[in-house]
Amino acid sequence: MATRASEGTGEQVSVVDLFTIGIGPSSSHTVGPMRAAHRFATMLVEDGIRPGRITCDLYGSLSLTGRGHATDRAIVLGLAGNTPEGVDPDRVDAILSAIRAAGALPLGGGDAVRFDEAVDLVFHKSFLPGHPNALAFAAILADGSRIVRRFYSVGGGAIRMEGEQRARANIVLAHPYASGDELLAVARDTGLSIAGIVRANEAAWRAEAETDAFLDRVRAAMVASIDRGCHNTGELPGGLHVQRRARAIREKLVDRGPRSDPGLVFEWVSLWALAVNEENAAGGRVVTAPTNGAAGVIPAVLRYYETFVHGATGQGARDFLYAASAIGFLYKRNASISAAEMGCQGEVGVACSMAAAGLAAALGATATQIENAAEIGMEHNLGLTCDPIGGLVQIPCIERNTMGAIKAINAAYLALHGDGRHIVSLDQVIETMRQTGEDMKSQYKETSLGGLAVNVVEC
């Protein structure tokens, strides 16, 4: 068995790190870079530094698919003081137009600083050793000196500044675990459910009621993204001329009457996942769960629970998200949720695994059944590449979320039909995902240099 989590060195992760409310189309390429830009600007403002000019260099996957993932827009917005959580998606175009027309931006929302996007935002095709998603900011002072900070967007909207130590040594969890086996051992030794273990651990950061309230807000944001996606129409940005389909599909399903046909269940689930990821592709407000590219899976499966499961409750929805988080923590700690490192198995695959565990928990599964559901959810996504056409989070990303949601439901029920005993453990499938991601060629990991991205002619 692996060492106990209390003996490990991995940084502790909270539910607020795993689920964040932001804007599309990408957590690693939009949300992360915006946070990095905002942080750099804030550091300068707080230190009283007034540069004459700001530059930003993008590397690796951020460069290769950055324009399609709106990385350029995100950086400008972040330097101007906007955050993914706070910016109004409906005002983004106006904010960017004003900055581009002026050739300057309000650094951190304050004094104007020169920023000519065509010159000061540079896309490099080379990779840096720290991470496939790298960006470097420079503040150029009046005497010609430069203040440079390098950041890495490590997946799910999380960022890491080079040279910074961020270990949360003062956080002592009630029930630490670093592997699936340890999680099951904690459940066995304490008698707590998987959701109960996470809820107790979150008390190290905040009161339990505050965490419940946070997850309620996350759930509400997921519902809102489904509803907006089901009502908005038009063509998605980026030049592929992809039309939104969710509203038309919903209208057809509503016309077919009561949801008594078993086959309609899967059509509704697919619709909900589709709606969220169309909203994400349009730059709308979604929940990073655990990434934007996979943002539709967990909301669709949660909506399935609340709509089609008799006796569904608000506490059941919370247990769903707590249990899903327990699984997401393991992927972040022991592998990665970055498509630039793992391919899409690290995004839709992880979301499928989390959703399967969450649904199983909400349906009353045992700890071993939940672990089994999570394992099944990933096992059948191993090797999934990330090859977006045109560098856009549209094809195959949007439909891929519908497949992930259906797989998650199937995985949960397969696990519930068993007693928790199975051949492949969750730890083994996570390690297999990690090894597969490392072996996967870079052209299949969010670079748009292979797969569908090069075999489909852009129109």
Image (cartoon, rainbow, N blue to C red):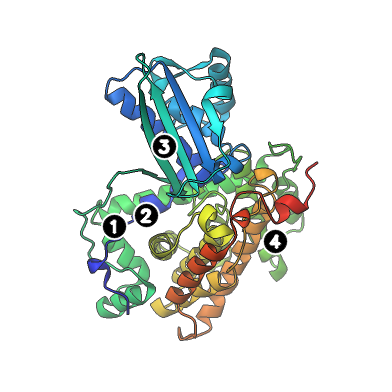
- Name above or below for residue 36 compared with residue 118: below
Q: Which residue is mark 1?
A: 202
Q: Which residue is mark 4?
A: 267
Answer with mark 2 or mark 4, whichever residue precedes in sequence: 2
Residue 15 appearing in the image: yes
**What's the residue at 23%, 68% (across, down)?**
7
Q: Which residue is mark 3?
A: 36
Residue 175 x/y as whole percent:
25, 68
Answer with mark 2 or mark 1, whichever residue precedes in sequence: 2
| Marks 4/1: CA–CA distance | 36 Å
| Marks 3/4: CA–CA distance | 39 Å
Asked if the residue under mark 1 is in contact with the one under mark 2, i.e. CB atoms within 8 Å, the reply is yes
- Name above or below for residue 106 compared with residue 376: above
Quarter of the image for the C terminus: give it.
Answer: top right
Quarter of the image for the N terminus: give it.
Answer: bottom left
Q: Which residue is mark 2?
A: 15
Residue 313 x/y as whole percent:
45, 62
Q: Quadrant of residue 97?
A: top right
Q: Quadrant of residue 347?
A: bottom right
Front tag of 1 and 3: 3
**What's the residue at 46%, 76% (across, down)?**
428
| Marks 1/3: CA–CA distance | 26 Å
